[in-house]
Image: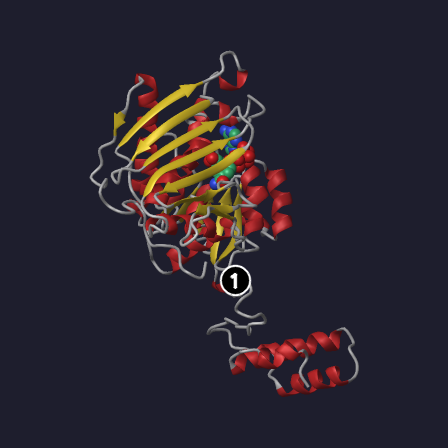
């Protein structure tokens, strides 16, 4: 007798099936289920090998049969995570907002990555966080003994989530300790620092990835495909905006030495990087203006508003705006010959929404659509991509070179605003598609 009608159809390999039934049997017995079900489970439990006889190697992927007709919205595949001991171990450096709000929780959604170690300057906070996430006390490091990660074989990747000016030092020390590096955006405070980070990782033979989460997120990837496949014809214009109204003027984001700049490197970078990603091209010219409210204590050292235009070799133009003084807006839209498509919000952590408009034949009435696509945790996708690159010896999709290119362009944006004239960007890569990107994220992510 099947436990459930669908259970009879479960497509499992024989060994996995026995394991599943064994587990089911133990679970049912444990909760004291009586009658036929329990008898069935007990029989199977006796017939199946115990947990100590389970294979410790080999595939663990499971498949389930379809429940719904193929007219229903498509569901994603089962997560099929890797067993914990096969995952790639991470140390996370810096226990601020992004780490505690997004990155550490994202390990629960990761399939190939696991949290092993923490690094912080605040021992009391680290002790609490370590207990929350089951990190062993001996795997907790300070900024001073960070280099001792060298001796921790369980850590293969260091994820740097510190103020921007600290990315260079912790990348270089991490690579010297023999670890691969995943570094938050912006990569650094300048292209010079970014270049040194790349060189240090190359010298140590370690991988370097910049955490451009948008490039791993499924809806943004779909927009990229629509642009590159010319679903609605050639792309003519991209319009992107990223704003947030900043609070405390004393936070590091308002100190030039720690942040490198204001709205541009922090949030305007999403407009810049996403336009480059959607088109796969590199801009050849920028034109920018900066406007900052006088006497606002938040903007003594860093800029408030930046408007910039990027010109691409295909003729496409991106109009971008970013502000540290305007209400939350994180959207972009791509205008092509026969339709437009984009995301609002597009740069947020959660609740992303894809929208598109076109006028299909034969009626040619304008149709506006908001396809509902299953959301995935962008941070988990990023953690898994880097883990996969380490395991399979691949170059990350967003390597250090991708971050360096953004720094070069941001420097041209500041120069253009200062000189109030367009600035040309010369790069040998201008004509190449995805000139600075590595191996594309795998289809199962
Ligand atoms: P945060 O201020 O919340 O955390 C920074 C951490 O660094 C804190 O734990 C702080 O104690 C520590 N720190 C060490 N030395 C410091 C110093 N001298 N001054 C200030 N803090 C110091 O910042 P956050 O929002 O977590 O940002 C960290 C990094 O992550 C930044 O590079 C930021 O650009 C990036 N970030 C990325 C995203 C994204 O979506 N990918 C989102 C937010 C932040």
Q: Viewed as shown, does residue 168 lie left or right of 89?
A: left
Q: Nearer the viewer, residue 263 or 357?
A: 357
Q: To which residue does mark 1 refer?
A: 76
State the residue lying farthest toward the top.
295
Q: Is residue 191 above or below residue 117?
A: above
Image quadrant in which the C terminus is located: bottom left
Q: Viewed as shown, does residue 256 lie left or right of 432?
A: right
User: For the point 72% across and 76% down, which residue is it?
Assistant: 28
State the residue lying farthest toward the front.
363
Q: Nearer the viewer, residue 102 or 290?
A: 290
Answer yes or no: is residue 67 visible: yes
Q: Nearer the viewer, residue 228 or 210?
A: 228
Q: Viewed as shown, does residue 381 lie left or right of 391?
A: right
Query: Label 1 neighbourhood size at 10 Å, few (<14), some (14-19), many (20+)?
Result: few
Q: Is residue 355 above or below residue 18?
A: above
User: For the point 51% across and 77% down, which residue is it?
Assistant: 55
Is label 1 in a helix, a strand or a loop? loop
Image quadrant in which the N terminus is located: bottom right
* x and y, in percent, of residue 288 in the image: 35, 24
* x and y, in percent, of residue 223 in the image: 41, 48
* x and y, in percent, of residue 153 in the image: 45, 55
Q: Nearer the viewer, residue 191 or 158?
A: 191
* x and y, in percent, of residue 421 in the image: 29, 20
Answer yes or no: is residue 400 visible: no
Q: Is residue 258 above or below residue 86?
A: above
State the residue lying farthest toward the left.
428
Q: Viewed as shown, does residue 429 lie left or right of 360?
A: left
Q: How has the structure been colored for display?
A: secondary structure
């Amino acid at each position: 007798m099947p436990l459930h009608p669908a259970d009879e159809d479960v497509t499992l390999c024989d060994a996995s099936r026995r394991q599943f039934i064994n587990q089911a049997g133990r679970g049912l017995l444990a909760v004291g289920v009586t009658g036929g079900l329990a008898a069935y489970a007990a029989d199977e439990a006796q017939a199946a090998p115990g947990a100590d006889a389970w294979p410790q190697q080999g595939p663990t992927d499971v498949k389930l049969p379809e429940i719904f007709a193929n007219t229903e919205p498509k569901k994603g595949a089962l997560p099929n995570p890797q067993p914990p001991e096969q995952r790639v171990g991470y140390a996370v450096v810096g226990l601020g907002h992004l780490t505690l709000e997004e990155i550490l929780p994202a390990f629960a959604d990761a399939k190939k990555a696991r949290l092993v170690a923490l690094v912080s300057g605040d021992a009391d906070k680290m002790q609490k966080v370590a207990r929350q996430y089951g990190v062993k006390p001996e795997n907790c490091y300070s900024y001073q003994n960070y280099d001792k990660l060298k001796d921790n074989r369980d850590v293969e990747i260091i994820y740097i989530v510190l103020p921007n000016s600290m990315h260079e030092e912790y990348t270089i020390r991490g690579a010297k300790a023999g670890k691969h590096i995943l570094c938050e955006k912006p990569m650094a405070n300048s292209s010079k620092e970014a270049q040194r980070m790349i060189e240090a990782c190359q010298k140590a033979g370690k991988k370097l990835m910049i955490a451009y989460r948008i490039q791993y997120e499924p809806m943004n990837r779909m927009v990229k495909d629509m642009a590159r496949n010319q679903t609605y014809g050639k792309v003519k214009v991209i319009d992107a905006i990223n704003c947030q109204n900043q609070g405390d003027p004393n936070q590091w984001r308002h100190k030039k030495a720690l942040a490198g700049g204001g709205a541009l490197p922090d949030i305007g970078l999403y407009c810049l990087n996403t336009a480059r990603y959607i088109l796969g091209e590199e801009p050849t010219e920028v034109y920018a203006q900066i406007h900052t409210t006088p006497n606002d204590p938040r903007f003594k050292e860093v800029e408030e508003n930046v408007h910039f235009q990027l010109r691409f070799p295909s003729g496409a133009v991106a109009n971008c705006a970013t502000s540290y003084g305007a209400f939350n807006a994180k959207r972009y839209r791509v205008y092509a010959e026969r339709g437009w498509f984009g995301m609002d919000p597009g740069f947020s952590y959660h609740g992303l929404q894809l929208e598109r408009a076109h006028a299909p034949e034969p009626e040619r009435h304008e149709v506006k659509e908001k396809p509902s696509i299953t959301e995935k945790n962008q941070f988990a996708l990023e953690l898994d991509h880097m883990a996969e690159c380490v395991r399979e010896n691949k170059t990350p999709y967003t390597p250090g070179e991708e971050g360096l290119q953004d720094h070069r362009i941001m420097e041209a944006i500041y120069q253009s605003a200062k000189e109030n004239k367009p600035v040309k960007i010369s790069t040998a890569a201008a004509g190449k598609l995805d000139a600075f990107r590595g191996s594309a994220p795998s289809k199962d992510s």
